[in-house]
Amino acid sequence: VLNDHFSHAEHSEEAIISETEMISVTDLTGPQEGQADKSFKLEAAKKMVQLSSGVEFEAWTFNGQFPGPELVVQEGDLVEIKLVNKDIEAGVTIHWHGVDVPNAEDGVAGMTQNAVRPGETYTYRFIVEETGSHWYHSHQVSSVQVQKGLFGAFTILPKEDKGEVIDHSMELVTFAHEFQSGRDIVTTLGLLDTLEHHEVAPGTKVRLRLMNSSSNTKHYVLHGVPYTVVAIDGYDLHEPEEFSGKMLPIGGGGRYDVVFTMPDSTVSLGINKDSYTNTMAGIVFSSGGQGDFTLGDDRTIFDPYSYGSPLEGALSEFTSFDRQFTMVLDMFYIGFYNGKIGATWAINGEVFPNVPTFMVQEGDVVKTTVVNRTFADHPMHLHGHHIHVLSRNGKSLTGSPLVLDTLLVKPGETYEYAFVANNPGLWMDHCHNLEHAALGMSMHLAYS
Ligand code: C2O
Ligand code: CU
């Protein structure tokens, strides 16, 4: 067995509330007027899950599925999601990662709402604008709850084909995930069904929505076919080109969309930890029979910053700034426990909640410089906003300008990015290695 596969996962039809089921509207904080275009119900509950290898573990599921159901909506939809917590003692919330919702809908426990306790419900309601591959996950004790399974794909389809959207006749979401089973950490590539082998007819245009729901960077590798990275963090790239045999580095919380045309031979998709280690988990696409999993030995790492065509004027609104901030990512040893070196992960020399908040005003154009002084990757995620990456290590970025919600900052790197303060509220900005976030690498952005 190459790897474990999530079972019990189905598509979102399961999650759609039947028309006769009533939603209580007393806890609504989003747009209260109007009939929702899409309504979902997500029930958080513990459930024993069995993987294809036979490993059993107690997952924390949405609607009994691990990961939770893929929610598919369309740009412009008014979406309503009723969260029900059956039996997760610490309480649950849902954060819409990559979707710039109004602050009150952002699902951060203890900040934008209280955690929803067992037996309680909470309704989220917002209009979706950001097309593309996003995800949702609990934001209460998230380093534990996401790992245990309280997450799923949140796919926002464009209203109409804008010409940039490449059609595809088959679409799959995969999650690189890590979870604890007994004393082991199991790394797995999850697909929204139970098969290790996917039957795909030759000639089919396949779109893979690759997500990393683990805390550590994973390198996705596709072998046996040329492919095109068409979007990163749900945002379409400008005139991307096809290539072969490169590893796609996706930080925790990040997403890449990849398109390929199925050949009449086998295609393998794997995940590696880095360019030195071997594949940790994989799946096979074949046009008949089982097909063999094979990977080439190409170890080139894809560089998203020198890919796609330069887009004229893309960064033109970011030539002068109302505020500038610096975020220095650091770590401090705090002694030994359990035979391990204990560490805290810090921003600007402080550990959450002592990291000073970035205060801005609505309408500000904000520039942030982020510096990684540690030996670890930090995928930095700003809630409620999209960031435009201006430079890396002092070099301004001339390729397809990246618009991200999660910026992978590797050891020693420095990035400058900009965003417009156009969504007032109290927002989290944290490392999406959720263990790092829990150990201090978190802070706030605030404005009213
Ligand atoms: Cu995807 Cu604050 O998280
Ligand atoms: Cu980190």
Image: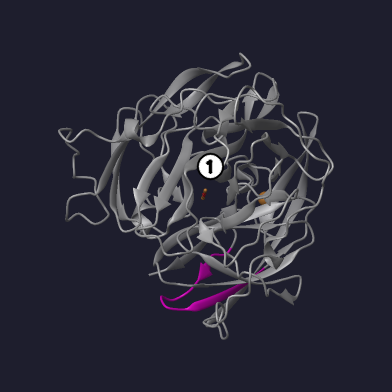
Whole-percent x, y for residue 30 in the image:
27, 55
Image quadrant containing the N terminus: top right
Whole-percent x, y for residue 222 in the image:
69, 42
Left or right of residue 433: residue 413: right
In this view, 72 is above or below 446 = above
- Write down the region rendered in magenta: 356-369
Whole-percent x, y for residue 122 in the image:
29, 40
Q: Nearer the viewer, residue 189 or 116?
A: 189
Q: Amino acid at mark 1?
A: Thr
Quadrant of residue 75 in the image? bottom left
| Res 244 seen here | yes
Left or right of residue 27: residue 178: right
Quadrant of residue 209 in the image? top right
> Is 367 colored magenta in this rendering?
yes
Q: Residue at x 55, y 24 (%)?
A: 195
> Is 232 colored magenta in this rendering?
no
| Res 139 seen here | no
Q: Residue at x 30, y 27 (%)?
A: 119
Image quadrant containing the C terminus: bottom left
Q: Dot 1 lies on which element?
A: loop
Whole-percent x, y for residue 53 in the image:
63, 16
Q: Residue at x 63, y 24 (%)?
A: 4
* Residue assigned mark 1: 204
Q: Residue at x 55, y 44 (%)?
A: 208
